[in-house]
Each structure stands twice: as C-alpha cells, then as structure tokens.
Amino acid sequence: MKNKFLYFGASAMMASMALVSCNDLDTQPQDRYVTTSEKAEAIVNKPSLASAGVVGISATYYTYETVYSNHIDFGWPSVMMLLDNIGPDLVSRNIGYNWFASAGTYNLGNNNNYMNNMGWYHCYKIIKSANDVIGNIDPETDNAQLQLYAAQGYANRAFMYFNLAQLFQKTYKGNESLPCVPIITDLNANEAANGVPRATVQEVYDQVLSDINKAIDFLSASGLSTSNIADVGVKRFVSLGAAYAIRARVNLVMNNWQAAADDAKMAIQTSGATPSSIATASKPGLTSSDESNWIWGIYTQEIDRVVTSGIVNWPSHMGSFNDNGYWAVGAFRMISKALYESIPSTDCRKGWWLDENGLSANLTEAQQAFVSSVDPEAYMQVKFGPYNGVVGTTTNANDIPLIRVEEMYLIMAEATAMAGNAAGGKQILEDFVTTYRDPAYTCSASSSAEVQEEVWHQRRIELWGEGQCYYDLLRLNKGLDRRGAGYETVWVYNVPAPLKPFLIPNNEMESNKAIGSNNDAWSRPAAVDDF
C-alpha cells in the first residue's frame, strides 16, 4: 500500500501535477513553449482548442491508482464508496478482500489515512484541471462556445470546494468563522507554491456560490447544450440543470431553504430528466448516464484504464452481477438490516437488496441464479445492474451517477417544509413516492422537522450507495449509529453528534507552510452493544 506521491499540498499540486488539460496548446513547433496569454488568444480565435481541457475535467473524475498503488484508488468513485462505508447504512465485512474496511473502522482521526488523503487529493486534482480551463478563457467572453467551456470549469470547481468544505470542517450553519481549506483558483495558482492559508467556512462557501453562479450565468447566456462539447456521454458535462442541482445541494447545506427548493425545481425543469418509473425501478439499473433520471454522471468507456484493469473500478467493489470483482469473493455491500426492514413491501425499492433468504422480487430467474451462486449474505445490494445488462460480464464499464433527478424532488420537499410550508413539503414528498416508488405510501409527518426527518429516511433508501449518506449525517447533525444494522461486533458504533471533521493530510501540513493549524485529532470509537 505504498503512497505514490510525496505531496498532497495544494501548493505542490499546483506546481507539480501533470493532468489532462489544454495540452495541445502547451507547445509550438521547434518545442517553443507558448505563454498563457498566447494560449488565451489562440482559444479566442479557435474556441475548439479549449475542448481538450473541458473533456479532461470529466476524465479526471475516474482515474486509475493516482493516489495509492492499490485497488482502493479509482478516482472520485473511490471517495464516494469510502464515505458510504463510513456511514451506518452500507454494511460490509472486515475481510482481506474488502479494500474499504479502513472506512468501516471509522479510524479516521489522524492526518495520514486513506480517507483524508483520497478526499483531499482528488478534490484538488479536479480543481487544478478546472483552473486550467478557467484561466485560459476571458471571464467577459460573449462567445457562446467559450461560455459553455468556462461554465464547466466554474461548476466543477464549485462542486469540489463544496465537497472539501463538508469533509474538512464542521457543517456550514453555526461554523462560518472556523478555518476550512485553502482556496486556490486560476487567479492565485502561480503564487500557491509559497503557501496558502486555510480560508474560513464562510469564505469557502462564498467561493462555491460565486463559481456556481458564474456557471449558471454562462450556461444561460450560451444557450448551448453539452452536446456541443461531445456527441457521446453528454451527461458527463455540467448542463444548466446540473448546475442548478449542484446549487440546490449547496443551499440545502447552508439552510437557504427557499433557494434550495427553487434551485431543485429549476434543476428538474431545465435538465429534462424524469424519475425512473416503478416498472424501471423494479429491476437492477443505474448503469448508463443515458438513463432518463440521470442529470450528471461519470461517463465510462471500455478502453478506460480503470476498466482494462479488470478489478480496479467501481463495479468491481460495488457490483453484484459481474464475473470479475471483489463482491464475488465475499466483499459484499449490504444495506443496514434495520433500514431494510423499514421499507414497506409495497415499495419497489425493497427489491434493490436481497431479503433475509437471499432473494429479490426484482430479479429475473437468471439474475437470481447468478447472485445465489456465490452464496451471498442477506441484504446484499442488487440495485446496480451489470454493464449492458449482461449477467456475468467481465467488462466493468458502468457509468456512475453523480446527481439523479429523484434527489431534486427530495430536496424540494425538505426545503419547502423547512422554509415554513410543512404541508407543501409533505405533499411534494407524497406525490413523488406514490408516483415513482410506492403507490401505498402515506407521509404521517405534520411539522417541518418531521417532514425533514421523513425526507432523510427516503434519501437513505433512494440514494443508498451513491455517496450521499455521510454528508447527510453532517448537515443534519446526526450521530453515527450502527446498532441493528448487521455490522460485525467490533464495528458496531454509536457516535454522538456532531461528527468530527477529517484532518488535513500530513503532507499538506508539511508542504504548505502558510496553512496554519490542523483540525483536532480523534480516536477510533469504542464498540457498543448491538440490538
């Protein structure tokens, strides 16, 4: 488990990291390097030259062993899986084939562990790629194609600073003045080698909102769709709907309730995405960004290194239908027993996991026979289908969802209730669940707080395995209660709120002399009695 890099510091990253970017603009014949101003002028004259950097941002999300030389590292999906394995809803076993067992231990209170390093490095790697695009485009451009490209840089930078803020400091509300993370943009990247201090939580969220607002403005002014960047995998790029969806998430965390509800509604309207029907949700899916309910996702091709690696990819660790993956040797991903039992039998999502007898009503005879052949544990996931629907496939080239439209309905319900309209939020929630998941559903909540709690319950079911569970614990000030979930005895925790922020990695603390103090260290919690 050798660490491939001797640095994680933002300053070292800006100076040293080689990333996919506008590489076609870096040199001229006879190997003369062109200046930044020359590149910007070239892009104005020929906007298509910036497309390499834009495509490079999306490619940076799903990369092979760029932090660690082992099978836990396949880019941003690794971070998503680590976060879900920390939480109380995704159960796995403490075995050698479970590369995410370190997250299960919740032993993250030091500044030299997988979770801290992976979260920090992959966020700043994507920020660097976004800065490269933004820095080569005039912020006042009226060229529609360049506006579309610039929006990709701003939206992705906003998304990554939003993730950093949630991981490396307490949640926004009530903690605005606490030190958060260094802000490195296209404007100060050249000076970053001298060190960048931690900005406050408020300053980071100000940067996030500034960036996502610019992305929305550029996308609105451009009038172009993401198909003007590439003609395949268009949802790997940030559309206007995706930008609104990102801002809806941000406003939700900031408790800007009405703004969150408005943005979620705009995301639904402008994305063109529609929730999966009960019939569609009653079988394994979520394999392709072409599905109607995806707003934004990671696009994967069979030639990508994470795919040709065979098993260093998301389906290898999360899948249940592929013929080469860690799930097939006992590293199953199960839902919490308590959460599973809370799902009514009339809800089509009950079949997203095996029952206590290892069966799911959502599976075909062939699918059931395949998963049964490995003697799976109860409550193993069968939510995510195989690549191209082929049971037993050896090609792990599934796309990976980042934002689905269903989440926007849940945000709209919660935010509407918390903005003072409990009845309205309840109605949005009931309409969504009865139409798309469970016709027999009724919501018994009456107050805004009760609606918020019920939305959280629905989020835990709907977004299971998609990297959102731990973030919800943080923003809702929930503890980490694994009792009744089915964890091994040594991983049964009941950690009270508020959960502590991750520590900034050791290499960043050493290389960035201006960063200041780290977050407080904390110890692995003691196991408690289960029930």
Image (tube, helix red, strand yellow):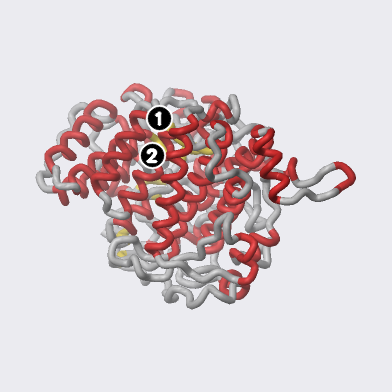
Question: On the image, numbered disc 1 is attached to which residue?
Answer: 271
Crowding at mark 2 (Cα within 10 Å: few <14, some 14-19, many 20+) = many
Q: Secondary structure at mark 1?
A: helix
| Residue positioned 55% across, 39% down in the render | 141
| Residue 109 drawn above or below residue 59 | below
* Side of 277 where 196 appears, left or right: right
- The answer to whether the residue labelled 1 contacts the one labelled 2, judged by CB atoms less than 8 Å apart, is yes
Quarter-of-image position of residue 149: top right
How many other residues sit within 10 Å of disc 1, few (<14), some (14-19) or many (≥20)?
Answer: many
User: Taking 122 as reference, is 454 left or right?
Assistant: left
The x, y position of residue 463, in whole percent, is 37, 42
Residue type highlighted by circle 2: Tyr
Q: Nearer the viewer, residue 484 or 256?
A: 256
| Relative image position of residue 243 (x, y in whole percent) | 43, 40
Q: Which residue is mark 2?
A: 244
Where, quadrant-wise, is the C terminus in this rendering?
Answer: bottom left
Question: Who is closer to the viewer here, 282 or 44?
Answer: 44
Q: Is residue 500 visible?
A: yes
For this orientation, the residue located farthest to the left is 446
Q: Residue at x 59, y 30 (%)?
A: 229
* SS under mark 2: helix
